[in-house]
Image: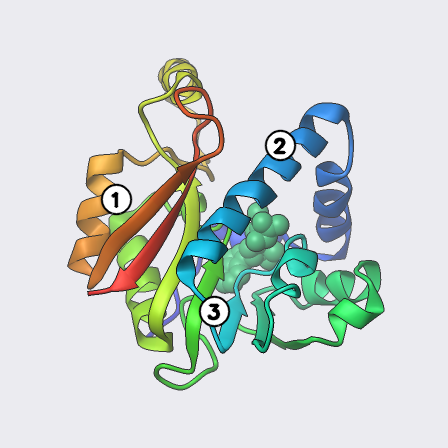
C-alpha cells in the first residue's frame, strides 16, 4: 500500500519535536489538559482489557509511555514517522520506561509489522490532521491489518463549544491555503470506522460539550 504523504508529517524535525514536547509541559492550562487526556486514555485502556502486545503510533515524545508502561505483561512497541521524535522520546522519558518499548521508525500508513501483530493500537493526536476521507481510510485500513483486536484513537469531533467556535474561525479564514487540523462530524467518522471494519465499543470526551477531543475505543467487527 502506498503511504500517504502529508505536508504536516514533514515538520517534525529535531527543533519542532523539542517545541512540541515543551508545549505540553508549559502552563497550567496545558498541564491540566494533558492530565485530562491521560485520564480518558487510562479509562479507554482499562476498558480495552489486557493486551499482550500494544503499539503506540505516533508515539511522538513518548507522552503516554508512563501510562502505557503500567500495563502488566504487555509487550510494548512505539513508532513514529519522525526519527527525531523517537530520539527525543528516548532522551526525555525515564530510562527504565524507555527500555520497555521496542522503538522503530514507520509511517502509520505503512507500518513495518505483519498482519495482526498487536492486540491494541494506541493512536493519539494523528487523525485530526487528516482532512481527506481517503487518507483516513488508508490509515484505518492499515490499523485493521496490524491489530488483531482493538484501537484507541483520538480526534476532534463536532457537537461542542470549541468546534462551534472553530467553525466560525474557519469561515473567516476560508481563503487560507494551508490547514493541518480538522474537526470531523461524529456521524461521519463513525460511518468511516464501520466502513473500515470497526465497531465503536466506547467513547470518552475530554470535557463533554466543551472540548473537541474525543477518544474512541474501536473493536474489529
Ligand atoms: C501531534 S503529535 C502526537 C504525538 C503523540 N501521540 C502525542 O499525543 O503526544 C503528531 C506526531 O505524528 C507524527 N507523524 C506525522 N505523520 C505521521 C505518519 N504518517 N506516520 C506516523 N507518525 C506520523 C509526528 O512525527 C508527530 O510525532
The residue depicted at 62 percent of the width and 32 percent of the height is 33
**Residue 213's x, y, as percent?**
46, 35
Q: Residues within 10 Å of mark 1 (few under 14, many from 20)?
A: some
Can you identify the residue that label 1 sits on? 189
For residue 33, which numbered disc appears in the image? 2
**Residue 158's x, y, as percent?**
32, 27
For disc 3, does the CB lie below 8 Å from ligand 1?
no
Left or right of 208 on screen, residue 8: right
Can you identify the residue that label 3 sits on? 50
| Quadrant location of the C terminus in the rendered image | bottom left
Q: For the residues marked 1 and 2, what is the alpha-carbon distance in whole angstroms?
A: 23 Å
The part of the image, by quadrant, that contains residue 99 is bottom right
The part of the image, by quadrant, that contains residue 209 is top left
The relative height of residue 173 versus residue 193 in the rendered view (above or below) is above
Task: Specify the quarter for ligand 1.
Answer: bottom right
Query: Element at badge 3?
Result: loop
Can residue 53 be seen in this snapshot? Answer: yes
Amino acid at each position: 500500500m502506498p503511504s500517504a504523504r502529508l505536508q504536516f508529517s514533514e515538520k517534525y524535525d529535531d527543533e519542532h519535536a523539542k517545541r512540541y514536547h515543551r508545549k505540553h509541559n508549559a502552563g497550567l492550562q496545558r498541564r491540566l489538559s494533558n492530565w485530562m487526556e491521560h485520564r480518558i486514555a487510562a479509562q479507554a485502556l482499562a476498558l480495552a482489557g489486557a493486551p499482550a502486545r500494544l503499539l503506540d503510533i505516533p508515539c511522538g515524545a513518548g507522552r503516554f509511555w508512563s501510562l502505557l508502561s503500567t500495563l502488566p505483561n504487555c509487550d510494548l512497541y512505539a513508532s513514529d514517522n519522525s526519527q527525531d521524535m523517537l530520539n527525543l522520546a528516548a532522551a526525555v522519558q525515564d530510562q527504565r520506561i524507555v527500555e520497555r518499548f521496542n522503538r522503530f521508525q514507520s509511517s502509520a500508513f505503512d507500518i513495518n509489522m505483519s498482519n495482526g501483530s498487536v492486540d491494541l493500537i494506541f493512536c493519539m493526536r494523528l487523525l485530526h490532521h487528516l482532512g481527506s476521507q481517503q487518507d483516513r481510510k488508508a490509515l484505518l485500513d492499515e490499523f485493521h491489518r496490524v491489530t488483531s483486536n482493538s484501537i484507541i484513537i483520538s480526534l476532534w469531533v463536532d457537537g461542542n463549544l470549541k468546534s462551534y467556535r472553530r467553525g466560525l474561525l474557519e469561515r473567516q479564514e476560508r481563503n487560507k491555503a494551508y490547514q493541518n487540523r480538522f474537526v470531523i462530524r461524529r456521524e461521519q467518522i463513525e460511518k468511516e470506522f464501520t466502513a473500515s471494519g470497526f465497531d465503536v465499543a466506547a467513547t470518552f470526551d475530554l470535557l463533554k460539550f466543551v472540548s473537541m477531543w474525543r477518544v474512541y475505543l474501536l473493536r474489529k467487527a
